[in-house]
Image (cartoon, rainbow, N blue to C red):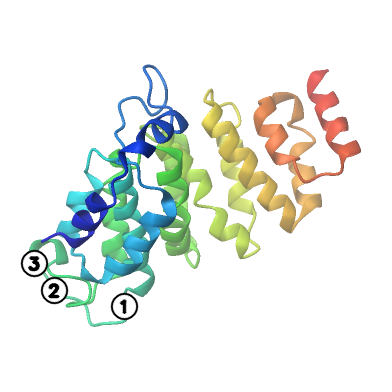
């Protein structure tokens, strides 16, 4: 039995569905068009995951992440984050036999971080809204790449991602680097996405620039100054949100010229 799926289905609250559907823009032509909801709020999903993640297998995660229900996909991603963070604490399944093939739980057999990352990257088609991206990518991809020199994966996602969600993964994953004081990738990937047409990318880039600025305001200002006129206004507003009022006015005036 897929305990994660069963527990999530048991938490459905139809009264919450209309509000969540509006919030995540599921109407015709909107970015979440056609998505379905059970009416489960994030704290409830987190509580279910905390209770169940040790009992899941990769088969269970596969069933959940391909669910038509938004909250079940989120539960799969949050469970995967837990599995990833605990990976390597038990011996891995013997060579040539994957956890997905065996259907064993992560508590029964150890899994590797590489298995978790491979699973994540092979299921990005179902990571299809901003919360699914933002709550999973930097604890997974960001953390995985933190001690690695080759971070080209994120640049490729930002530049060539098949969807805005894959492109958003490329920039938001750098949050882990920022928290470790490494800002270069954030600025370089922001350059890739500078002229992106979608508002959800503008918001994500601006958010990550703002976080970089918390660490090193002069570095953010150096990045901003030659690019202000090119930046989408939403991206700029997010990036300078923590600046003093007078400085914000200055940058917005520069944008308007």
Disc 2 vs disc 1: which is toward the camera?
A: 1
Q: Residue at x 81, y 27 (%)?
A: 252
Counting from the top left corner in percent of width and height, residue 141 is at 42, 56
Counting from the top left corner in percent of width and height, residue 170 is at 47, 44
Q: Residue at x 88, y 31 (%)?
A: 250
Residue 138, labelled with which disc?
none
Q: Nearer the viewer, residue 172 or 17?
A: 17
Q: Circle 1 is placed at which residue position?
A: 88
- Residue sticking out furthest to the right: 246
Q: Is residue 195 shown left or right of residue 51?
A: right
Q: Give whichever of discs 1 and 3 has the lower sequence position.
A: 1
Q: Circle 3 is placed at which residue position?
A: 102
Q: Quadrant of residue 79?
A: bottom left
Please determine whether, in this image, residue 110 is positioned above or below residue 28: below
Q: Is residue 219 shown left or right of residue 184?
A: right
Q: Circle 2 is placed at which residue position?
A: 95
Where's the C terminus, which quadrant? top right
Q: Nearer the viewer, residue 126 or 120?
A: 126
Q: Quadrant of residue 206?
A: top right
**Crowdedness near tag 1: few (<14), some (14–19) or many (≥20) residues, C-alpha within 10 Å:** few
Task: Give the distance between the C-alpha atoms of the residues marked 1 and 3, in whole angstroms.
Answer: 18 Å
| Callout 3 secondary element | helix
Please determine whether, in this image, residue 4 is positioned above or below residue 198: below
**Crowdedness near tag 2: few (<14), some (14–19) or many (≥20) residues, C-alpha within 10 Å:** few
Find out whether the residues at labels 1 and 3 contact each other: C-beta distance under 8 Å.
no
Task: Give the distance between the C-alpha atoms of the residues marked 2 and 3, in whole angstroms.
Answer: 12 Å
Q: Give whichever of discs 2 and 1 has the lower sequence position.
A: 1
- Residue sticking out furthest to the front: 15
Q: Nearer the viewer, residue 52 or 249?
A: 52
| Callout 2 secondary element | loop
Residue 62 appears in the picture as rendered: yes
């Amino acid at each position: 039995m897929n305990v994660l799926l069963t527990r999530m289905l048991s938490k459905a609250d139809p009264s919450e569905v209309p509000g969540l559907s509006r919030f995540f823009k599921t109407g015709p032509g909107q970015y979440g068009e056609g998505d379905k909801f059970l009416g489960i709020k994030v704290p409830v999903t987190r509580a279910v995951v905390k209770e169940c993640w040790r009992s899941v297998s990769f088969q269970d995660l596969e069933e959940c992440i391909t669910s038509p229900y938004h909250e079940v996909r989120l539960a799969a991603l949050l469970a995967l984050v837990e599995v990833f963070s605990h990976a390597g604490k038990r011996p891995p399944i013997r060579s040539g036999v994957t956890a997905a093939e065996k259907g064993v739980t992560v508590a029964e057999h150890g899994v590797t971080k590489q298995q978790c990352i491979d699973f994540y990257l092979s299921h990005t088609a179902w990571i299809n809204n901003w919360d699914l991206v933002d709550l999973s990518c930097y604890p997974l991809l960001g953390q995985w790449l933190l001690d690695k020199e080759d971070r080209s994966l994120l640049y490729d996602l930002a530049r060539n991602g098949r969807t805005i969600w894959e492109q958003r993964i490329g920039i938001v994953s750098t949050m882990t680097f920022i928290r470790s004081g490494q800002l270069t990738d954030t600025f370089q990937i922001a350059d890739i996405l500078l002229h992106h047409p979608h508002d959800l990318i503008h918001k994500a880039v601006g958010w990550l620039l703002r976080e970089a600025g918390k660490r090193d305001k002069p570095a953010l200002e150096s990045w901003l100054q030659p690019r202000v006129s090119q930046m989408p206004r939403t991206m700029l507003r997010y990036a300078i949100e923590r600046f003093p009022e007078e400085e914000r006015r200055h940058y917005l005036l520069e944008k308007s010229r």
